[in-house]
């Protein structure tokens, strides 16, 4: 089967291991991820900071192109893109004048017929049903599931999971044999778009997240957003500086964790691309 | 984040409610509006559902329009602008181009220089910008939205 896919710039660039692991999972299930033809950047954290119409028009073009290509479901693995696409669909569907204005800007019709899925929803719908019989090596680790901001907020628009102490990632991780820890930073902000312009703030915000996960004795942080991943993984040097200790806690995409449980090759999952090496303790090897 | 802000969001809203022009100006000149990350935690927890993030978006564009940008926000805006420039000309974000453009705007030439070799070694850094086929669509979107919303 085929479903629509919007990779977005960071999943297509610096966070390509996320795309690789999505594709590896899809392959294991015989799902074809079809990219939106000629997709553009959603504007991410920059557009809405400077210009509201621009922040609506960029995602609107993507959604219009997906509709035109006949996509009924669109997987958007990046939580930031998912958030921008959902907000745009929401705004345009509730205001007809705005919808017309934005259509004029993009030069494309917008109907709002595409169902936008974040990575967890995609997993719930297509990966979970056959998961138990496909597991080759249970992912027997203690994990801290980190949802961040954009997957669960604003709740009124996204209507996904719950904004306080969400559970969907934890449930997925339990199914592959992991033990999610109860911790306090599931939905705290990592600093997101200020990674380059205010690195000190990001080290502070992300540092607190990493510190709590370590305190709860997690073996890994599980994420579903490339912005969270790059702050928690690529910014580890700054985080270590903030925490005044060297923390080796790896940050793993949910798709990579499932991939490992399915016995997919580490390289195919892009695990070699992480800044913080993914060296999980050997115990899982023994529990075949 | 609030500890970095010059006006906490609750106070900022109170100032807005006064409808006194000098208070409006104080808000538009604040560092706070640029530090807000739109993490949506405030609206998520507010029992009165006061929706601050869209207000922050409005205040930021208004602050630029009225040329009242806080001098401390220079880096943050330079980053947003470099980001949008990259999209405007190619349709997609070119990460290396973004960083180089940001550096040239802020003169932070050596910031994150240490990240590059490791990113290259891990195959995370592309050297050639990807262009969408209909770059004309980007021109259209940018010229039509920026005209109405003022200079970004």
Image (tube, coloured by chain):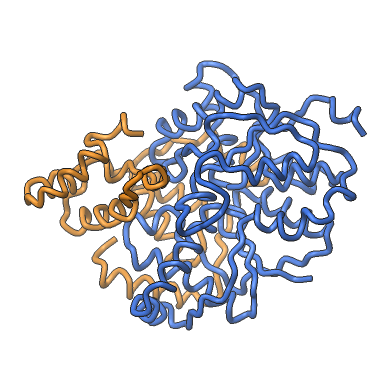
Image coords of residue A271 (percent x, y): 73, 40
| Residue A1 visible at all | yes
Q: Tell me the shade of chain A.
A: blue
In the image, residue A35 sits, relative to residue A215, either above or below, namely: below
Q: Is residue A275 visible?
A: no
Q: Relative to B144, say whether A59 is above or below.
A: above
User: Residue drawn 32% across and 33% down?
Assistant: B2
Residue at 45%, 62% (x, y): give it.
A87
Q: Position of residue A265 (x, y in %)?
A: 84, 45
Q: Nearer the viewer, residue B110 or B146?
A: B146
Q: How many marks?
A: 0
The residue drawn where x is 58% and y is 65% is A116
- The correct choice, above or below, for A102 with respect to B116 in the image is below
Quadrant (top left/top right/bottom left/bottom right) for the C terminus of chain B = bottom left
Left or right, B117 with reference to A55: right
Residue A119 picture quarter: bottom right
Q: Residue furthest front?
A: B47
Q: Quadrant of the N terminus of chain B?
A: top left
Residue A94 image point, x, y percent: 40, 72
* Image location of residue B147, percent across then percent down: 27, 72
- Point 49% across, 27% down: residue: A208
Among the 4 quarters of the image, the one containing residue A106: bottom left
> Chain B colour?
orange
Tell me the quarter of the picture where residue B61 sits.
bottom left
- The answer to which of B99 and A124 lies nearer the viewer is A124
């Amino acid at each position: 089967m085929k479903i629509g896919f919007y990779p977005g710039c960071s999943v297509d660039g610096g966070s390509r291991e996320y795309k690789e692991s999505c594709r590896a999972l899809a392959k294991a299930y015989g799902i074809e991820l079809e990219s939106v033809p000629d997709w553009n950047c959603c504007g991410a954290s920059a557009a809405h900071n400077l210009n509201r119409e621009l922040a609506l028009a960029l995602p609107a073009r993507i959604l219009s192109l997906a509709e035109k290509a006949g996509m009924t479901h669109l997987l958007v693995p990046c939580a930031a893109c998912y958030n921008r696409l959902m907000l745009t669909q929401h705004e345009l569907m509730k205001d007809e004048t705005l919808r017309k204005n934005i259509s004029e800007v993009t030069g494309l019709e917008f109907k709002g017929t595409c169902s936008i899925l974040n990575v967890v929803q995609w997993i719930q719908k297509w990966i979970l049903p056959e998961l138990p019989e496909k597991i080759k090596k249970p992912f027997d680790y203690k994990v801290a599931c980190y949802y961040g901001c954009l997957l669960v907020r604003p709740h009124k628009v996204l209507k996904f999971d719950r904004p306080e102490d969400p559970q969907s990632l934890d449930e997925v991780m339990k199914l592959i044999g992991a033990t999610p820890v109860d911790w306090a930073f599931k939905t705290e902000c990592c600093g997101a778009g200020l990674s380059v312009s205010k690195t000190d703030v990001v080290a502070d915000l992300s540092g607190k997240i990493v510190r709590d996960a370590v305190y709860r004795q997690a073996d890994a942080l599980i994420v579903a957003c490339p912005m969270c991943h790059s702050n928690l993984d690529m910014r580890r040097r700054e985080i270590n500086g903030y925490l005044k200790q060297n923390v080796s806690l790896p940050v793993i995409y949910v798709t990579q964790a499932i991939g490992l449980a399915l016995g997919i090759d580490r390289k195919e999952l892009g695990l070699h691309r992480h800044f913080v090496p993914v060296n999980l303790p050997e115990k899982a090897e023994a529990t075949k | 984040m609030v500890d970095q802000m010059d006006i906490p969001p609750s106070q900022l809203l109170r100032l807005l409610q006064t409808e006194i022009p000098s208070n409006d100006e104080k808000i538009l000149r604040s560092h706070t509006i640029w530090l807000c990350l739109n993490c949506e935690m405030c609206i998520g927890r507010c029992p009165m559902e006061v929706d601050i993030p869209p207000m922050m978006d409005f205040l930021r564009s208004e602050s630029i329009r009225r040329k009242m940008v806080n001098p401390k926000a220079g880096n943050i805006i330079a980053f947003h602008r470099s980001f949008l420039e990259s999209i405007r000309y190619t349709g997609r974000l070119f990460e290396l181009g973004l960083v180089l453009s940001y550096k040239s705007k802020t003169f932070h030439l050596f910031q994150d220089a240490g990240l590059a070799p490791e990113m290259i070694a891990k195959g995370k850094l592309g050297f050639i910008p990807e262009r969408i086929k209909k770059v004309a669509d980007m021109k259209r979107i940018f010229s039509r939205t920026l005209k109405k919303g003022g200079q970004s």
